Amino acid sequence: MNRLAGASSPYLLQHADNPVDWYPWGEEALEHARAEGKPILLSIGYSACHWCHVMAHESFEDPDTAAVMNARFVNIKVDREERPDLDRIYQNAHMLLSQRPGGWPLTVFLTPDQVPFFAGTYFPSTPRHGLPSFVDLMNRVADFLAEHPDEIRRQNDSLQQALGRIYRPAGGAVPALSVIDKGRAELASTFDEQFGGFGDAPKFPHPASLEWLAWHAARHDDAEAGRMLARTLDAMAAGGIFDQAGGGFCRYSVDARWMIPHFEKMLYDNGPLLGLYAERAATGDARARRVVEQTVAWLERELRDASGAFFSSLDADSEGEEGRFYVWDPETVESLLPEEEWAVASRVWGLNGPANFEGRWHLHEVAPPATVADALGIDEAEAIQRLDHARDRLLAARADRVRPHRDEKILGAWNALMITGLARAARALERPEWLALARAAMAAVRARLWRDGRLYASVREGATGAMPRAYLDDHALLLEATLALLETEWDSDLMTWAGTLAETLLADFEDREHGGFFFTARDHEALIQRPKVYADDAMAAGNGVAAQALQKLGYLLSEPRYLEAAERTLANAGPMIEQAPVGHMSLLTALDIHHGPPPLVVLRGTADDLSGWQRRLRGQAAPVWSFAIPADAPGLPVALAEKTAPETGVRAYLCRGLQCAAPVTDPAALDSALAAA
């Protein structure tokens, strides 16, 4: 066993018995590199990554390859889910060095002072795909560094300057509202009219873009934005990116039709998608409701820890094959189903047609149930019922298969995304049991990741390694999740927690001189750069989430410091938003709020009286921030305590920005006031 044997990361533990002399990232490895004058071979991946496993089997488990690695490099393994700070820096370095996007595994060669001078992703063990063998590459890289140190030094200086420009933008002014129209036009130009989504294969859900479409459609009555959102959600729900038998979404589709996914399932995608589908289901969409119910069932069944928190991911592979756990052959399915269920399932899921994944069948909707019902001469409701029964039978049969590996890290940011999704789903569909799941997860995150007044990013049961410090995303997303819980059901303790998170954002992460929030805290270890990230990627950017959440909390508490921090963020990011609005959708939402916050309603009254008012507010077409605070709620901040409850009934306070109208006690009067707002 090498030095990874005591790691907290399941991904690092997968490499603990490699013949490679791996180090985890830390001072021991860095000091060894400096003392020996050796370059560093940095390998970044994660436990559910298919190509990470391929490179591990081909190279890191091979003694001859390991001998070259050990002789010529100090070798460091990093779990990108535990150390997103390192991943962000070196992914951007890869982009600058190679002029193409990175990915995982990320393979980066560093000088002993941590500056990268060559980078790639997967390298094969033998020359193929236009790539050299990994051993040949390593020898050439090490030789070049030894023979051309001055050239590498000049390149490193240029790289550091380029990274500095990325991570320390000069800033400008808060963009005008017109940039939102530019972003909408750019997004529409990439919309796939035939299959939904944006761009071509591989096709990702991009929750930040979908969230923006939902916001913009409701806020500005934009029917076209609503249509793009609906088309995408429908296509994904019918596609193979959604697990038709077991629920939950895979990370992306390898084709433009959403048919064949990359089979890993990540917690971070499923949280926002759960909220979006639930809000669509609330309009009466039966398919969206099924997606939500299946996804919550999958979450409880396969990703929920005993503490109430959620694990991070499921692997794409099982028994050494990608997708093996999920795919079928028609003979097996037919043997599991009664004839009447097979008649529907075979037609809906394409089991009566050609194979679509390496000689086998991955389930996706080839024909809608309504079309199949017509062909069989039965009611659509009967066809859907038969399909539901077929799902149950396939899920039961699949339970006997060898399951994909589960990464049992508890990640604060990813749990926050799911807590928000569950809270939104509970609110939209009036499912208190889902709210209970969200509240239990938040309690578990606080119990396990908040220690001695400090938040940590990750924990795993039984791990002995040090817990990584929390990042901007952890704090911002947990603040967003806390506000989502408070909007669903008031809890004064959570209100205090929201204040703690907001104050920590300002104290530990804000760039007080230029605006915006750094990705790492003030006392984080020194790296070659301190990133400040504005662009969305697989998750909404922490700066965008922070700017949204701080504005909502700032208006709720009449706290100008939070509003000013959000404004400084928008100003510092302004030129980047104007240049590429479609890459900054979460900041576009924050910008929309800055120029005109939605109505905020504070309801005060007895718990029994509040529920009807809450239900009525949820029926509003345009976004409304609403908080229903029981009359006996303890420990309220001054701005909320001043909004008193009546002796009987409910008193509603309608605010727009920092201005509040006289309270009303009649729901119809509130409706009229909202219509005029």
Image (spheres, helix red, strand yellow):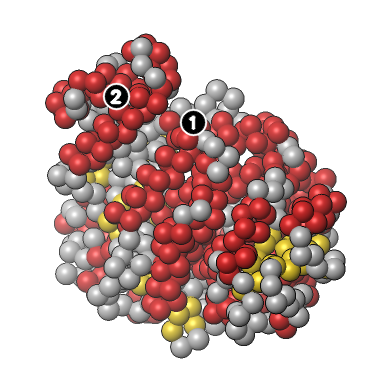
Please indicate, yes or no, whether residue 513 appears anywhere in the rendered image.
no
| Amino acid at dot 1 | Ala
- Describe residue 135's horizontal placement relative to residue 562 as left or right: left
Instruction: Say which of 323 and 49 sits in front.
Output: 323
Instruction: Say which of 67 and 537 sits in front.
Output: 537
Quarter of the image that includes the C terminus: bottom right
Please indicate, yes or no, whether residue 492 appears anywhere in the rendered image.
yes
Q: Position of residue 190 (x, y in %)?
A: 63, 32
Q: Which mark is residue 345?
A: 2
Q: Which mark is residue 179?
A: none
Q: Residues within 10 Å of mark 2 (few under 14, many from 20)?
A: many
Q: Position of residue 574 (x, y in %)?
A: 76, 57
Please report the residue visible at 43 percent of the width from the left and 73 percent of the height from the top.
443
- Describe residue 618's horizontal placement relative to residue 172 as left or right: left
Q: Residue furthest front?
A: 648
Q: Residues within 10 Å of mark 1 (few under 14, many from 20)?
A: many
Q: Which residue is mark 1?
A: 235
Q: Position of residue 25 (x, y in %)?
A: 38, 71
How far apart in space, not on screen, are marks 2 and 1 (Cα)? Answer: 18 Å
Q: Secondary structure at mark 1?
A: helix
Please report the residue visible at 58 percent of the width from the left and 69 percent of the height from the top.
607
Please report the residue visible at 29 percent of the width from the left and 50 percent of the height from the top.
315
Quadrant of the rendered image containing residue 196: top right
Q: Position of residue 243 (x, y in %)?
A: 35, 39
Tag count? 2
First in sequence: mark 2 or mark 1?
A: 1
Please report the residue visible at 41 percent of the width from the left and 31 percent of the height from the top.
239
